[in-house]
Image (cartoon, grey):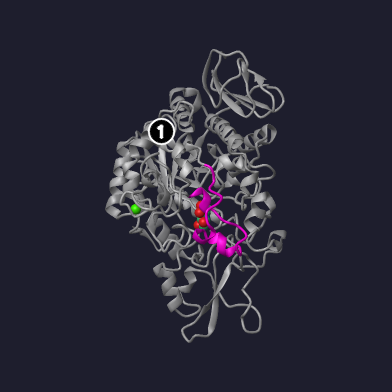
Amino acid sequence: MPSKTDVAPWWRHAVIYQIYIRSFADGNGDGLGDIAGIRSRLPYLADLGVDAIWITPWYRSPMADGGYDVADFREIAPEFGTLSEAERLIEETHKHGLRIILDIVPNHTSDQHRWFLNALAAEPGSPQRARYWFRPGRGPAGEEPPNNWLSVFGGPAWTRLHEDNGRPGEWYLHLFAPQQPDLNWTNPEVRAEFEAILRFWFDRGIDGFRIDVAHGLAKHPLLPDINVRSAQFPPGLVEAAEMRGEAVAQHPHWDREDIHEIFRQWRWMADSYAATPQGARMFVAEAWRIRTGGLAQYLRMDELHSAFNFDFLKCPWDADKLRTTIDTHLAMLAQVGAPATWVLSSHDVTRPVTRYGLSGDWTQLRVGLDAGLVDIELGSRRARAAALLMLALPGAAYLYQGEELGLPEVDDLPTDILQDPIWERSGHQIRGRDGCRVPLPWSDTLPALGFSTRKPWLPQPPQWSTLSVESQTHNLGSMLTLYREALRLRRTYSAFLDGHLRWVEAPSRVMAFKRGKDVMCLVNFATDPTPLPAYDKVLLASGRLDGHMLPPDTAIWLQCKE
Ligand code: NOJ
Ligand code: CA
């Protein structure tokens, strides 16, 4: 088991690898990734040099939203394995010197969760319905939804029931798909149940949780209409609009004050494990729609440990904008003493190699892409530089499976096999997130590129054989080699553990900063090569140097004198 005697708690500077379980590795040959697949690839992850893994939901689920619709938080989905396999995975992960965190989905359950099934069978106004948000409709016959809230996946956030007598009845709230009814966090049973679930997994050795939709748990008790611009966007585009920062203060269902009390309780519980051999447990929040600067409130000493910095992920490839984003974030976190948590990629956004290769505005993170507009070579070059930038910043970083292989977005999946609910809910306007969820290529020769012995649940582009782990392992110029080397250096040089960064003067459109006394990171965003400063040793470069010059879209780590 990883030691708990590190100088700073592990999560303050860890690199955590996100496993999207159905696409990582298939251990039983049914075309779907599973726990057995993860167990077989633990040596790969340890060798890559990450500190921990995060596994996306593996609980029993009808999979209406890739497992983010949970039917039972204490059971493993049979397609992924069994509870005893999960326990063995936890043990083996620790034996490999890695930590393991899970995904908790507290904003909603599946519509197949026993609580929701009981609610459907119960009367309006019953205690069973009080665990969710059931309301009569508006209009003379209740035919209008109770308010104008929209689902993040498109369409209204309300679905109407047919009661036992077949007559239309109450409506229920779902900020995501109709199969994901929102829980009512003012209900004490909901709070008690989630505390018990967290303990269930902590007691099995889980080191922490990524909290899904952490900013969404509290709703305005009166469920008022949203009287803001975001409500005027056509269905399906609300999320894109809000991602562009058009969410407002005092939103009735995002980032409300009541959330903090829930997380204070969770923190208390995670800290209560301090005396166990593994030490206290941790949380990382997924919170997109937070008022400017508001993230610090989630990261106060007695609340959550960390939260993804999505501004960094959304920031265009621009030295000034990135520097401002980094500075703003670090200054905000300094108020509460929290570490930064950087991320460039996830199962929800267009892969960086494609994003950075897109011309125009790619701040809408999951548009239907026109492949003609993507310059993959440019995108790969920038993604390599972005990796060195991110891994040189103070704090923790998350890698999404396949990022270390430089996988591009698969933007031409046939529409009849798309599984993301966004595709249907947006009226076929937005393809959704399947393109970043295509199964990993492990081998250049085996069927399904070594992912499975059967047809994978989403087809892999045949040209991915050259991007497979096998192809890249001994290729010194590959993305995988770059990540391995960067992670090795991050572990070797103590400068990376220091929580600070010092900017160094640099030419326009060049970013330069120092970590500790002797490590410098330089990134060239300009269109011309830029001269390197005086240095003792090149630790790592994201591309080939041009003599003493750093080419455009390239990053370098240097060892320099103080
Ligand atoms: C965020 C998750 O990352 C995403 O995949 C999911 O669809 C939504 N939350 C709803 O749970
Ligand atoms: Ca399988």
Image position, residue 331 (x, y; %):
63, 35
Please provide percent x and percent y for residue 122. 44, 78
Q: Can residue 276 be seen in this view?
A: no
Which quarter shows the C terminus?
top right
Per the image, the residue denoted by label 1 is 48
464 to 561, vertically: above or below: below
**Residue 221 in picture, x, y percent from top left:** 59, 66
Could you tell whether 250 is left or right of 120 in the image? right
Circle 1 residues within 10 Å: few <14, some 14–19, many ≥20: some
Q: Eyeballing the image, is 227 above or below 436?
A: below
409 drawn magenta: yes
Question: In this rendering, would 85 be left or right of 211?
Answer: left
Q: Position of residue 427 (x, y in %)?
A: 61, 65
Q: Which of 332 and 110 is in front in this view?
A: 110
Q: Is residue 495 left or right of residue 95?
A: right
Give the number of marks.
1
Q: Give the range drawn in magenta.
A: 408-437
At a point 41% along the width and 31% down the height, the residue shown is: 473
Front residue of this view, candidates 136 and 332: 136
- Return the residue nearer the eye: 505 or 23: 23
Residue 255 is one of the magenta-drawn residues = no
**What amino acid is found at the position of numbered circle 1 in the picture?**
Leu
Q: Does the residue labelled 1 lie within 8 Å of ligand 2?
A: no
Assign the N terminus to one quadrant of the image.
top left
Q: Main secondary structure of the magenta part?
A: loop
